[in-house]
Amino acid sequence: MRKSNNITAFILSLILMSSSVFAGNGRPDEGYRIPSVEQTKFIIDYIEVDGYPHRVAYAGNPDGEPVIVMTGFPEDDLPSARWFINEMIKHPDGDQYRYIMVHVPFLEEYAVPTYSRSPDYTVKYAELDGHDVKTNQPIRYKGVTPVDPRYDHENQAKVYYSIVRGGLGIEKAHFISHDRGAVITDYMLGEHPEMALSYSRGSQAWTVYDEGWGKLAAGGIYIGPPHTLFASPGAAGALDKIFGEGYPFLLVTPTFVKKAATADKESELGQRWQAIQDMRSRPEDFLRVSREMFRQSNLQYEVGQRIDSNNANSILKTDFPLMHFQGEDEMIEAKDVPGVELVDEKTQTYKFADLPEKQGVLSHQLSLQPWFGKYNWYEGEIVNLNPETVFQSPNDPVWKENVDKHVKVQANGIYKTLDTLEGARFDRFAIIPDAVHFSHIENPQACAWAVLDFIADVKK
């Protein structure tokens, strides 16, 4: 396995080693490949930190300015980013950059959890409980179930820094993140803001999340991912229902589902559809190591860390250029999806298309990360299109007026931007059409243009 050829960088990597456990890894598959997309090919590499080989991939101009990408859960994060990378390369400015994909630390298929730290073997226990998907009852993990401390997001952030700064020898880069990768990158750049030429983050909470919002689910309003389920063995069943049946919410926009579910399997659209479908049946080994993360972190804690005035490393205290991107179709009620018909009044379940299995079924709402309304995750950052609404209300006069004033179509309709407020930390807020949570798979072109247009403006 390759270590940095730069001796200075290698020595620095030794200095920067985190307190991760030395053991707990198998051998990477030497035949591992990421399929090419059009003319874009990917080179696989491994960067060792504390003896663990972290997987990375390269594409684009090898002499270009580095753009570093980390995505999240439950996707197979390097292959599922390949269409996004390809669209960035096709952007008018795309050939200026070297694209580096870094796997979420310790989620590779060869990772093996270990529950003690070397050399003192002090055991760390879960900081959070789980939730049983079948009984709807909490499962006790906090303080009694050992966890692997490598999977604490703050430790993953330190490892990420070691990969980039030590292993790759990169001092400054443009960073892009999504989902869990955004939490990890937030921590890393909060501690090391000097590394960021710019930062574009997507589909992740920011400074607003109320623990009580979880109780809204009893009334059919879902705000924020069910991380307590992912901390539990029932995650497999939950993912199958979410991605296979759209229950109790759909994490993929119907506009993508309708055209992708019946696409030729060999086409790019068919492959993007399959990447999302694969999330419903991730291998048990992957779910097992993922549980280590969700037993050590949740949205409430992560938001608390950002807004903690005593946290010297909060990303809110940085000043590098920062953009957030979010799927446009978040929090649409199923009944408002064009062409639906009601099939179960009690559960407010609708059918919108004749598709394989239950792919044409919609359960109540689309996704669960509001960027407007009563439960706006980004209050104080962006104009609230309708502060009184729970779900999208495009026919409401307040919504219409604010859209006309504050939403701007960009790049001939490829994506949109929403005005930020005075004093906001976000320099830009991009809205990705025809997308909800997995925007970089649902609409990779819009994500690519939003990010590279932002980088271009930063460089002016």
Image (spheres, grey):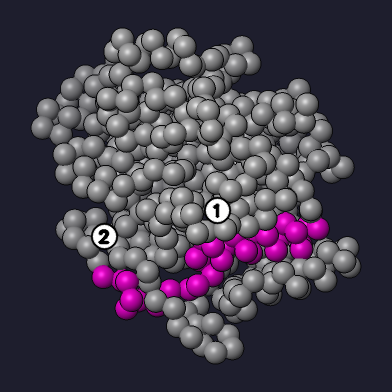
Residue 228: x and y in percent read: 32, 57
Q: Is residue 447 visible?
A: no
Tell me what residue is drawn at x 42 percent, y 54 percent.
304
Would you call the spot at circle 1 few (<14 residues within 10 Å), some (14-19), or many (20 or more)? many
Q: Main secondary structure of the magenta part?
A: helix
The answer to whether 315 is drawn above or below residue 125 in the figure is above
13 left or right of 135 in image: right
Secondary structure of the residue carrying numbered label 2: strand
> Residues at badges 2 and 1 in contact (C-beta under 8 Å)?
no
Q: Which residue was labeled with disc 1?
A: 314
**Is 74 in front, or is 264?**
74
Residue 132: x and y in percent read: 24, 60
Would you call the spot at circle 2 few (<14 residues within 10 Å), some (14-19), or many (20 or more)? many
Say whether residue 202 is magenta: no
Q: Quadrant of the rendered structure where residue 19 is?
A: bottom right
Secondary structure of the residue carrying numbered label 1: loop
